[in-house]
Amino acid sequence: MSSDAFDIMTALGEQAKVAAKTMRMVDTKSKNRALQLAAAILRREMAEVLAANALDMKAADESGLDAALKDRLALDADRVESMAEGLEQVAALPDPVGSVRDLVYRPSGIQVGHMRVPLGVIGIIYESRPNVTADAAALCLKSGNAAILRGGSEAIHSNRAVAACLRRALVDAGLPQDAVQLVDSTDRALVGALLKSEAYVDVIIPRGGKSLIERVAAESRVPVIKHLDGICHVYIDADADREMAMNIAINAKTHRYGVCNAMETLLIHQDAADLAADLTKAMLKKGVEVRGCDRFRAVVGRLDVKVASDEDWATEYLAPVLSIRLVGSIDEAIDHIAQYGSGHTESIVTQDYDAGQRFLREVDSSSVMINASTRFADGFEYGLGAEIGISTDRLHVRGPVGLEGLTTEKWIVLGHGEIRS
Amino acid sequence: MSSDAFDIMTALGEQAKVAAKTMRMVDTKSKNRALQLAAAILRREMAEVLAANALDMKAADESGLDAALKDRLALDADRVESMAEGLEQVAALPDPVGSVRDLVYRPSGIQVGHMRVPLGVIGIIYESRPNVTADAAALCLKSGNAAILRGGSEAIHSNRAVAACLRRALVDAGLPQDAVQLVDSTDRALVGALLKSEAYVDVIIPRGGKSLIERVAAESRVPVIKHLDGICHVYIDADADREMAMNIAINAKTHRYGVCNAMETLLIHQDAADLAADLTKAMLKKGVEVRGCDRFRAVVGRLDVKVASDEDWATEYLAPVLSIRLVGSIDEAIDHIAQYGSGHTESIVTQDYDAGQRFLREVDSSSVMINASTRFADGFEYGLGAEIGISTDRLHVRGPVGLEGLTTEKWIVLGHGEIRS
């Protein structure tokens, strides 16, 4: 690592730590005021933000950035307005900080409970999507943390403009501007330095493609909240309502293709194979390529159903492709999920009480569902208000991560002079 | 790392992972039965356990192990009986696994909640205290996890005998014996291999001295739940009840010296300096060496109060030594704690409402107390039933770690055919 990168990150880290110390004690009203001001400033500085984005788009054209990435990078008036509305939505969410749960009297006479408090300094590493700058900063700010933001280098001008609005709002609200800091450089060594900032940073959240997240997880000395794959399964049980099963399978696969909670593999109990033909027809009609196990292909008997290989079961397509497997029992379905799943989201469709209970208990994923589309695995749908990502880790926070996932708890003890005897 | 160590740990890890898959679905009755059987077997095999311990004690004599370590290593009938009772106590605790909280209807019609589930495979690295073998295994077992235990090499025979009792009990209860595995070797390379077993192990909990924990934290690729120092503070506010302040300070310092929740530094508001003389006298009478800041020494005016250096404020004595500082305000006290504290446990003594509220909100430690002895920071006192340690980490679990700290949550969704629109 270059000593320059290390020095820059040390300065950012120290500033963040000082800001975090103030932020964790700031009252709800001031935090909300900062978010509302940020929304107003973003709208007021719209022209400046769009001009900065134009610089990024020009560079993207020149470097031949691919169309999908350019679409994510591009801002227009509507997208900036969406960012501003997102800030206002986070302002409207309840503040998790300071809430106390389970305060009880103990036999010794002391009262013991848990108080929710911020994590401290949060590092966000993301790709070239300027809206993440506003979204991530808003969640960190509302949860009383300081944020160090490292966005993709293609978005540097846009991120700089958006971060400037946020920092101005912090100052106008009487809060430390270093509660939101952008790593204002495209030097890749800074990512490495951030991942080694365990003295300043409490947690790193990478947002982006698998290769980015794998690199972060492998290199980081700071704890990471992450999700790698979303190989989500729907299992249609023998006792499934057939219409419900069709609706859920089609929604889980075709509602959106490029999202982590889309179904990638469909498991069907052999006694529900009667819906195989209709289901295949419906998927093909939606433009979904269907790949099946040998038994499924024999049942359906269509040449346009391709062969699913072992690799298919382990693939997150993020595309209009679906692999289907016929299973002999719920055990086989649960075993398949344990072997090939990524621990993200799985759903059973069944009217059988025991099958539903077993699936709920035995499938070990961040979200486990009965009779619902996997597409519901989402912070908004779960009532978190907003999410900074979905965690497939086991520790600290699992599934959609909202404000609560950006906090921790401390024990509080209210005594009356009690001593240990 | 030797490939031997790697192979041994891979085998243990694979076996643990298979056992964990069963353990996470085992009903409460079977887990309790295994713990009760383990207690019975431990009592029945008392002679064998004591004989194994005698081998360790003989080796300890020969190698000249120091007296304190030998005391921790030694077993007798009473200590084995205590281990058995500890197993029965864990059996009597409520099972956290499978409990569901906050199951609510969402506007879409789905019900969303959190279900508590085991972490998976837990590695425990500890010093030569055979009772930890039983205690740690019991907590892992009750919380539905598989444990890989690596005790200090001086206790290898004792640990082997105790682990054998636990494994026999698992088999007798119809559970996988590999839910409890001992690293049956004194090869130090195995610790390194365990710390790199991120493919099999979900979390590592080191129990022991600071150097052990520092090594584990530095080397581990598996997430670690740990606590380093316990530099606990009591702050006597201007508005403290003087008698209560005396009682709490004396209890926090002198109830036990070698424990992490003992007070190491006492901060006194200058307006409460009237109790300085009595307090110093009481501490000295208990055999506590008192070191003070210049102002405190001037107030007390005793030659037997030594000078507290900057190093004193940053030291966990774990001994009958106390450093005392006179502060001008609660702000100064909170700043001192932020600068020198270890984030373990701090207590304010005050009758002032605002001072109590400020201390509770602004001090960022795993336990923050009003008018109670720091000695209460303990899993039993907090109602956890038993504890596997105290965490001063911020993520996942903070403060005393009981059964709940050895679990995580998954989201559950109960639907009725809902799809995303």
Image: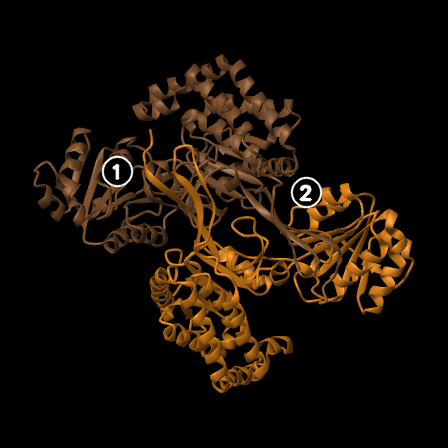
Chain colours: A orange, B brown
Q: Secondary structure at mark 2?
A: helix
Between A136 and B136, the residue placed more toward the observer is: A136
Query: Please, which chain is the residue tagged with disc 2 on?
Result: A
Q: Is residue A361 left or right of residue B260?
A: right
Q: Is residue A18 left or right of residue B160?
A: left
> For the residues tagged 1 and 2, is the chain the same?
no
Q: Residue B244 shows which numbered tag?
A: 1
Query: Please, which chain is the residue tagged with disc 1 on?
Result: B
Give residue B99's position: percent from left, percent from top. Answer: 61, 41
| Residue marked by disc 2 | A361
In which quadrant will I find the C terminus of chain A?
Answer: top left
Q: Which mark is nearer the camera, 1 or 2?
A: 1
- Give the residue drawn at x 59%, y 27%: B32
Q: Residue A233 shows which numbered tag?
A: none
- Give the vertical position of A293 relative to A191 (above or below): above
Q: CA gap, disc 1 to disc 2?
A: 50 Å
Give residue B244's position: percent from left, percent from top. Answer: 26, 38
Give residue B119's position: percent from left, percent from top. Answer: 56, 42
In which quadrant will I find the N terminus of chain A?
Answer: bottom left
The answer to whether any part of residue B277 appears in the image is yes
The answer to whether any part of residue A335 appears in the image is no
